[in-house]
Image (cartoon, rainbow, N blue to C red):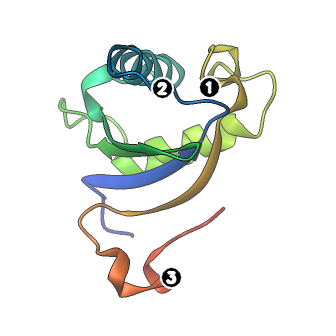
């Protein structure tokens, strides 16, 4: 049985990212809400770290109740939904064009190389 992941880091490709600070804050909040609604988990488990060049780096944390799926299972659900045009994820204003580019266990260094990065 695989070890549960307490957090995973995902890189999402989105259609557009606002450039102004207040618009970026709204974008982050809306993205987190859409991911939460699609996954059925609290907004607080989605932490936006970086937004650059059409890519958004999001850390997905373990559901705080401890009773739900681990972070990697939440991401797997979002990956499945990103490939289904009829999914809840695809109904969002931001997530309607979202694509999962890569993900890795949170806390791993990008310097470890591609062997640590999982790309669907």
Report the residue marked by disc 3: 114
Check disc 1 and report its element: helix, strand or loop: helix
Q: Quadrant of the N terminus?
A: bottom left
Side of 97 where 72 appears, left or right:
left
- Between disc 3 and disc 2, whose residue precedes? 2
Residue 20 vs residue 107, the one in the foreground: 20
Q: Position of residue 25 (x, y in %)?
A: 33, 19
Q: Secondary structure at mark 3?
A: helix
Residue 10 position (above or below residue 64): below
Q: Callout 1: 10 Å neighbours few (<14), some, many (20+)? A: many
- In the rendered view, would you say 21 is above or below 110? above
Is residue 42 shown to the viewer in this render? no
Residue depicted at x 44% and y 15%: 30
Residue under circle 1? 95
x and y, in percent, of residue 91 in the image: 68, 14
**Front position among marks 1 and 2:** 1
* Crowdedness near tag 2: few (<14), some (14–19) or many (≥20) residues, C-alpha within 10 Å: many
Residue density around tag 3, few if under 14, some if 14–19, many if 20 or more, within 10 Å: few
**Residue 39 x, y percent position in the rendering:** 48, 27
Residue occupying image coordinates x 62% and y 25%: 95
Q: Residue furthest right?
A: 85
Q: Residue furthest front?
A: 20
* Residue 57, visible in the rendered structure: yes
Q: Are marks 1 and 3 in contact (CB under 8 Å)?
A: no
**Circle count:** 3
State how far apart marks 3 and 2 are (Cα).
26 Å
The residue to which callout 2 is attached is 35
Tag 2 secondary structure: helix
Mark-to-mark CA distance, 1 and 3: 26 Å
């Amino acid at each position: 049985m695989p070890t549960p992941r307490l957090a995973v880091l995902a890189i999402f490709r989105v259609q557009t990212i606002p450039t102004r600070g207040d618009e970026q804050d709204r974008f982050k909040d809306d993205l987190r809400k859409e991911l939460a609604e699609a996954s059925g988990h609290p907004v607080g488990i989605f932490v936006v770290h970086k937004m650059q060049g059409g890519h958004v780096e999001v850390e997905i944390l373990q559901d705080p109740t401890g009773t739900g799926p681990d972070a990697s299972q939440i991401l797997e659900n979002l990956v499945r939904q990103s490939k289904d045009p009829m999914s809840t994820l695809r109904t969002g204003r931001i997530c309607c064009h979202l694509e999962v580019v890569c993900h890795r266990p949170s806390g791993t260094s990008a310097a470890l190389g591609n062997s640590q990065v999982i790309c669907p």
